[in-house]
Image (tube, rainbow, N blue to C red):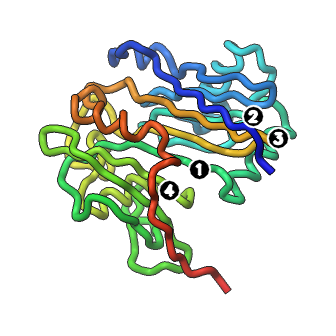
Amino acid sequence: MTGISVLRVYTSHFVFSSAQWCQSMFSLVYQHPDFLVINKHPGVSVHKDDNDQPLLAEVARQTGDEKLYLIHRLDKMTSGLLLLGRNRDAASALSTNFAQREVEKYYLAIGTKKPKKKQGAVIGDMTRSRRSSWKLESSKDNPAVTQFFSAAAGNGRRLFLCKPHTGKTHQIRVALRSVGSGITGDEIYGCENADRGYLHAFALRFPYKGELQQFVSIPEQGELWHVAEVQDALQEWQSPWSLTWPKLLLKSKS
């Protein structure tokens, strides 16, 4: 039984320049004895490069941890909340939460064009396409599932609040392209250049040792997040788990 819940909202209170993004890989959001929550900056990779993980090494250097464990991943262009385990047992428990889909994840994205629908769900299998890209299929054998709301983002763009129920590679990027609104600045699936790829890991909620952990990270890095229409929508979405998300009727595997 999950007991007390505490909501922690992170904002840097100043606007980063592109040069500052490069100088700093992350901002520390929260330190728990068993885990860390960081705000990963855009353009920073979480993947191993020649058996080295510079992001984790830099976080450990600043926090004094001997070793950190990556619980989940974000694409290089994606900014926002990233969860790191501080010991093996905590990492195992948190990874199990993700595997059993006990973690609620919410993302923000800005799309270049008006979508085919303003809200709803994108459900379908994903298969490899050309090079490093993926595509959405009409089949639903092992589907990627993404719900979304949207709002005006100024200059014909659209702001999306996405709730993925699965964790497929490039899932949200492919989903938004499939509804006709590729993410602004996305070099693979988008159609408009920008100062960054506009996808941000906005909120996390998960149980841990009887307490419901809740985190929200307001996006700061990128000029389009500061458009008035976007700021208005963010005020409405600061507790994304409290919104009325339609129930999904998914066929269970026999």
Q: How far across and down, in percent of the image, does residue 220 sit?
A: 38, 24
Q: CA distance from mark 2 to mark 3?
A: 14 Å
- Callout 2, which amino acid? Gly
| Residue bearing the label numbered 1 | 104
Q: How far across and down, in percent of the image, does residue 64 sit?
A: 76, 14
Say which element carries label 2: strand
**Which mark identifies residue 164?**
4
Q: CA distance from mark 2 to mark 4?
A: 22 Å
Mark 2 / mark 3, whichever is N-terminal: 2
- Callout 1, which amino acid? Glu
Disc nearest the viewer among 1 and 2: 1
| Residue bearing the label numbered 3 | 209
- Callout 4, which amino acid? Pro
The residue that appears at 43% across and 30% down in the rendered structure is 43
- Callout 3, which amino acid? Lys
Disc nearest the viewer among 2 and 3: 3
Say which element carries label 4: strand
Q: CA distance from mark 1 to mark 2?
A: 17 Å
Residues 50 and 121: in front is 121
| Residue bearing the label numbered 2 | 85
Residues 188 and 86: in front is 86
Say which element carries label 1: strand
Mark 1 / mark 2, whichever is N-terminal: 2
**Which mark identifies residue 247?**
none
